[in-house]
Amino acid sequence: MTPVLVVNSGSSSFKYQLIDMDAEHVLASGLVERIGEANGHSSHTVFAAAAEPGVAMPTFTEATSSRELPIPDHTAGFAAMLEAFDAHGPSLDDAPPVAVGHRVVHGGARFFEPTLITPLVEINIDELSVLAPLHNPPNLAGIRAARKAFPGVPHVAVFDTAFHQTLEPAAYTYAIDSEIAAAHRIRRYGFHGTSHKYVSEAAAAFLGRDLASLRQIVFHLGNGASVAAIDGGRSIDTSMGLTPLEGLVMGTRSGDIDPAVLLHLSRRAGMSTDELDDLLNKRSGLLGLAGSNDLRDIRAAIERGEERALLAFEVYVHRLRAYAGAYLAQLGGADVISFTAGVGENAPRVRAEALSTLGFAGVEVDPARNEARERGIRIISTDASSVTVLVVPTDEELEIARQSLQVARS
């Protein structure tokens, strides 16, 4: 058994998975939340293989336990996690993790691969917080707490931005004063890189195709959403930019917007920088248009005849089509288009509408395959489609574990 612990730390919570990398099977997962509050919450789920007579592949049972307790900081949160492992298993004494992988949102232009965490790397992550003030500080808090909990284990940072470091200057450069851009590190960085990497590689493996030969477009559609153009396994363009705000319409984020809108609201509505930040990140997107950031709610509202819900859906799809067309042009055509994450995996109408105008590029979605409620990676295009369209469930934790193990072994 080769266990790797994966940690995804936020400001008031963190998620974790313990994965046996020999079988790439999750042994346990959990969530520690309400960090900093008097009444925190910890939940822990154990997955155990249960062999069945006459069945070649084992099934898995799961048992979840939870408790309420004070969790004043991330260090206390990791103590609660260790107590859950001690009480409910699997035993970390019998199978200690060989590495701890950490999701870090922003690596700037400094980190282009998974990196062994040292005090200097911590300093760099902290310094890069200016580019991701909502994400890097809690990521770093989780790293520091985890290093206390597992002092003798290699800790590895896997950066959301790293996969997109292959972008050419023409793709990552904004057309503003170059000296100002350089002084303030303003450029396109891109995000969801761990997911885009996992999905593009999984698609190639599923199709039995050489990754280096494929032109792929990957739509990662969740509450946060992005799309990437991937040529031969290398990201050549992506919708998110300096921050995760740019690009597609998202649950609460606006995506692309004329920057003069901000100047207009500042001058005419007297809105401050913080108010504009809150507007674009927390009160825009589907929430701003339809009053909900959940597409299931919006579908129900459309069925009730609510016009603003229909408009929200149409704006959402319009942006998807725009990026699909742009990336077909950047790639010179596509071999594979994949959908992943919560919306991408579970909203057949979104998939169908996003690709409905791409018949000219050889894209044909099979309605029955698209509507089928199957799990796992699957083809939803017709047999005649010259572009293979897939639904690929993402597994960012497994991708982080793979990269972390590679670094630990090196």
Image (cartoon, helix red, strand yellow):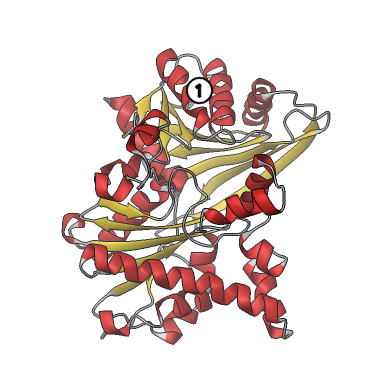
In the displayed structure, 45 sits above or below 305; it is above
Residue 385 placement (x, y as % from top left): 27, 82
Q: Quarter of the image for the N terminus: give it.
A: top left
Residue 43 seen from this side: yes
Residue sitting at x 35%, y 48%: 175
Q: Is residue 399 left or right of residue 302?
A: left
Residue 389 at x, y percent in the picture: 34, 73
Circle 1 residue: 126
Residue 25 visible in the picture: no
Residue 339: % across, % down:
42, 65
Q: Residue furthest front?
A: 267
Horizontal arrangement in the rendering, residue 293 relative to residue 206 (left or right):
right
Secondary structure state at the residue bearing disc 1: helix
Q: Quadrant of residue 70?
A: top right
**How many numbered circles does the render carry?**
1
Tell me the residue at 46%/57% (across/down).
247
The image shows residue 127, relative to residue 177, as above or below, that is above
Q: Residues within 10 Å of mark 1 (few under 14, many from 20)?
A: some
Most extreme residue toward the right is 38
Q: Residue at x 56, y 45 (%)?
A: 47
Residue 176 pos. (x, y %): 38, 44
Figure quadrant of the C terminus: top left
Q: Nearer the viewer, residue 314 or 119?
A: 314
Height in image: 341 above or below 79?
Answer: below
Task: Work out whether residue 187 or residue 91 is closer to the camera in this orientation and state it.
Answer: 187
Nearer to us in this view, 126 or 144: 126
Q: Amino acid at mark 1?
A: Asp
Above or below 174: residue 149: above
At horizontal 49% and vertical 34% (from top left) the residue drawn is 131
